Amino acid sequence: MGTPSNVVTTSLSSVQKRHLIRSKRVPMRKIINISVLTMIAAVFFMPLWWMADTSLLSNQQVFDYPPHYIPWHPQWTNFIAAWDQPYFSRYMLNSIIIAVAIVIGQLVTSSLAAYAIARVPFRGKKIAYGLILATFMIPVQVTFIPMFLMMKEFNWIDTYQALIVPFLGSAFATFWLVQAFRQVPQVILDAAQMDGAGHMWILTRIVLPMCKPSLLSVAFLNFVFHYNDLFWPLITTQSNSMRTVPVGLTYMIANDGSGTSWSTLMASSLLAILPALLLFFIGQKYFVQGTAHTAIKE
């Protein structure tokens, strides 16, 4: 049986050993986490890398085996050829015009609807909000035929109106902004109302500035969605001057047949996604803030 001092020494040693073992386990856990996250990131990044790699190869190198994972002799002329394709710049301009117009329209309509639901008491508010949320359950493809007939009746086929007007309202944007507007402290709105401010003044001077990250998140998501939309522009456009980037690229492949230049096509696709990528890199901070702000509960 040891002395008390030996017992304390033994106890401290065992604690130190457990601490050392635990300290060794933490880096291993970090390594595993980093490895898993790196693999997940690689899965998402691989299509973009493959697109960029193919856009810098010659058309012959695209079909080589083993494949060229790194373009040692980049063919920058592919991007010039992509841009010089007939109507390509027009496709990009159309996509940007349509996406920006829809985003602005949705921010206006959704902000008004969300403010009314979140901050204005009126009879039937819960029912109205429930009906808006119920539209989430309706696949947008189901609405294409009636919308197309309506656009045809208005004589809007192959016009900007047909591509923009049907999407000026958004249930998703309204739902997102309702959650954000509910986070604004009621005491601030009460103080403004006591000073004589109306709802429009409160909305434009207080609520919208305080919810800027959520507004930017909605704008970013809707821009990407409508910039990359294929089916509705494919249905409602007939001329090259009105086609968007996804529709234009689809027609490029279809018209080229077996003679498709995949390197030029990948260069076109890379140029086409650049606006969305730049927007993401510029606004990712606001997107994360908006997501966190909307997720907070009262």
Image (cartoon, helix red, strand yellow):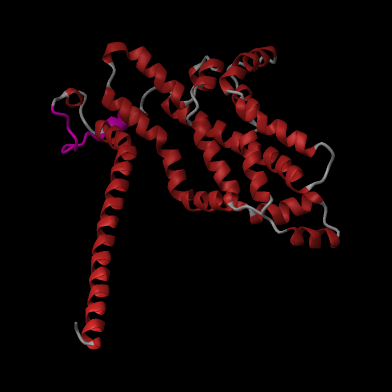
Q: Nearer the viewer, residue 69 or 104?
A: 69
Quadrant for the N terminus in the image: bottom left
* Residue extending farthest front: 1
Q: Give percent across and percent down for residue 95.
A: 50, 30
Magenta portion: prevailing SS class: loop
Q: Give percent across and percent down for residue 248.
A: 43, 21
Q: Is residue 24 left or right of residue 272?
A: left
- The span picked out in magenta is 66-81
Q: Give percent across and percent down for residue 151.
A: 65, 16
Quadrant for the C terminus in the image: bottom right
Q: Is residue 76 left or right of residue 120?
A: left
Q: Quadrant of residue 267?
A: top left
Q: Is residue 54 above or below residue 177?
A: above
At 40% from the left and 38% from the top, the residue drawn is 274
Magenta span has 37?
A: no
Q: Nearer the viewer, residue 39 or 115?
A: 39
Q: Quadrant of residue 136?
A: top right
Q: Give percent across and percent down for residue 196.
A: 86, 59
Q: Nearer the viewer, residue 53 or 34?
A: 34
Q: Is residue 143 above or below residue 277?
A: above
At 49% from the left and 25% from the top, the residue drawn is 244
